[in-house]
Amino acid sequence: MIKTMSEVNFNSKAFTYVDNALVQKSASEVLLNLLSIQPEEDVLDIGCGPGHITKKIAQITKGTVQGIDVSQGMIEQAVSSSKELPNLKYSVMDAESFELDTKYDVIVCNSCFQWFQKPEQVLMRCFNVLKQGGRIGVQAPATQSYCPNFISAIEKIRMHPYTREVFSYFKSPWLFFDSKEEYERLFMNYGFDIIYSELREESNLFSVEQAYKIYQSGAENGYLNQSFYTVTLTDDYISVFRKLVKEAIKEQADSSGMVNLKFERIYLIAKKQ
């Protein structure tokens, strides 16, 4: 398999993702509660990353649990940390082109829907591998204001004399809809009935270091990904970019050194008609 730059970015984060993806982890707990996975259900986890959520799912159900991710590094990390669970397996697969013989009761899509360049293909494949009446659960950053803190930090990149020219060649890779109705329509167009959907604003206090690590666990994989620029990124550009983002996040801290990190997030549960 030929790795894209996007895959390489996630490969490099495989060993730190679990520790740094604090908001993704807390949001996954909400998603799993909404899905209410039953003890015998078969589950597919799309974009499973290093498998920390997939492993939790495999402890909820005795059914078959399959995790897939486009990143070889993420899957290797997932396999190494889940060897004791006989009902759990992983494969390197792209969500837009995966093929599986097994049919599943539940599909989990945690903090990765925003990365899909062709969500229609993902949903068609999800529909095909779900059992009749099966359900899919998605949680992901949403709206163009997905994280006001990070957007404010990126404005510093956009305006800074050293980074603004190169950054002008950046093209956002993310899929963001600005209303839950737009997400609902997308799923309904591919054969799903909406069980639940909500666009939430969430906020939590983090230290500057924690907030920066959360940024690195997700957003940085887009902002510093060669695949999303039409000019070549240099080590100096990457270094200055990181320094400016960290400075911007530090400027957002209150008098006690804490950052109120805000996210707009979609939670959606849908059922195969």
Image (cartoon, rainbow, N blue to C red):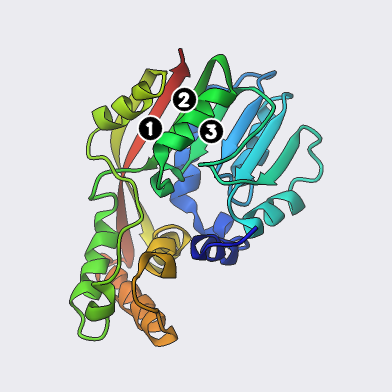
Q: Work out how far the residue at label 3 is from the one at label 2, CA to CA, in angstroms.
A: 11 Å
Q: Which residue is mark 1?
A: 267
Residue bearing mark 2: 34
Q: Amino acid at mark 3?
A: Val
The label shown at residue 108 is 3
Closer-to-camera residue (7/15) = 7
Is residue 225 visible to the viewer in this orientation of the structure?
A: no
Q: Helix, strand, or loop for circle 3? A: strand
Quadrant assignment for the N terminus: bottom right
Residue at horizontal 46%, vertical 25%? 34
- Residue at image position (21%, 73%) is 158
Of the image marks 2 and 1, the number of the one nearer the N terminus: 2
Q: Residue 9 vs residue 151: left or right?
A: right
Q: Nearer the viewer, residue 113 or 95?
A: 95
Which residue is at a point 40% across and 47% down the rendered structure image?
Answer: 117
Under mark 2, the amino acid is Leu
Mark toward the start of the polypeptide (3 vs 1): 3
Find the distance from the CA under tag 2 to the CA under tag 1: 9 Å
Q: Is residue 46 visible?
A: yes
Residue sitting farthest toward the left = 159
